[in-house]
Amino acid sequence: DEPSKDKNLTTLLQEGDKLLLNGQFNDALPIWLKILKEEPNNPNYNFKLGLCYKYSFDKKTKALPYFKVATSNMMPNYNFSSNELKHAPYDAIFFLAETFLASNDPENALDYFNLYKDKYKGYPPINVDKQIRYCLNAEKMLSAPLQIKYTNLGNQVNGAYTEANPVVSIDNSILFFSSRRLRDDKSNKSLPDGKKGIYPEDIYISNYQNGEWEAPQYFKFNKAFAFSNSALLNCERAS
């Protein structure tokens, strides 16, 4: 009956909000999918489902249609915990722009980053100057694409897990890269994301010997937090 249906929806909304606030986006995703079935055009619900995809491991671009709906009805004074609202926050514009950028659409991303700035008369709560530079650089690169050949380094380096942020020594004999693979001692299996098969990023090292890359070794100076390892490699690439 209708009261029972409303009670179930209220329970789902409370659980969905709790998971989002705790940063448990993968767990929140199926809950917000259920909620959206009840009100598919609710901008607030679309915004929260969009967040689930935005912060997912490999489904970030799926957030696009949900953030589009979210930006159809927004308000400046937004209360995240109020699910009676039919509005999304202005920050939905920022997340829509980021998702356009992740979808290799810098032109639309630039439009929405500028719109986000305009909403706050040039001083938004999330500074987007860096993202705007990304968009301008991306448009420039797309207008004159480079001819790049990607070569798989073989099963020794490229596996079933995500590998990224490669840095090669000046003599091309050592490769540093980040990987979300299961460690040999399985010590990352019990970590929060590891329980879902999404392991934190660690740095690995591979040496080039006799014309091929050797099996990567775990870098003993890895940090406790995955983002620190990625940042280390990205800083090294920029230096």
Image (cartoon, rainbow, N blue to C red):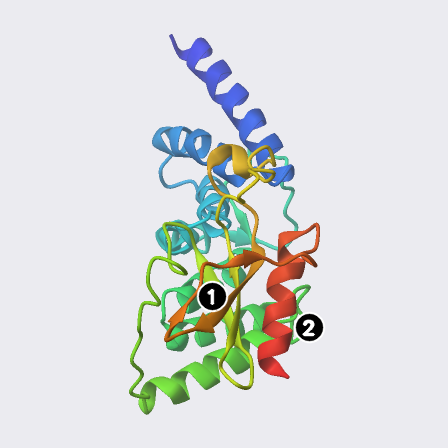
Q: Residues within 10 Å of mark 1 (few under 14, many from 20)?
A: many
Q: Residue at label 1?
A: 97
Of marks 2 and 1, which one's residue comes earlier in the chain? Answer: 1
Q: Give percent across and percent down for residue 32.
A: 45, 34
For the point 56% across and 80% down, the residue is 169
Q: Amino acid at mark 1?
A: Ala
The C terminus - image quarter:
bottom right
Residue 123, which numbered label?
A: 2
Q: Give percent across and percent down for residue 231.
A: 63, 66
- From this viewpoint, is residue 129 visible? no
For the point 39% across and 49% down, the residue is 66
* Residue 217 vs residue 87, the one in the foreground: 217
* Residue 197 vs residue 204, the one in the foreground: 204
The N terminus - image quarter:
top left
> Disc 2 vs disc 1: Cβ atoms closer than 8 Å?
no
For the point 50% across and 71% down, the residue is 166
Q: Identify the image quadrant of residue 80.
A: top right
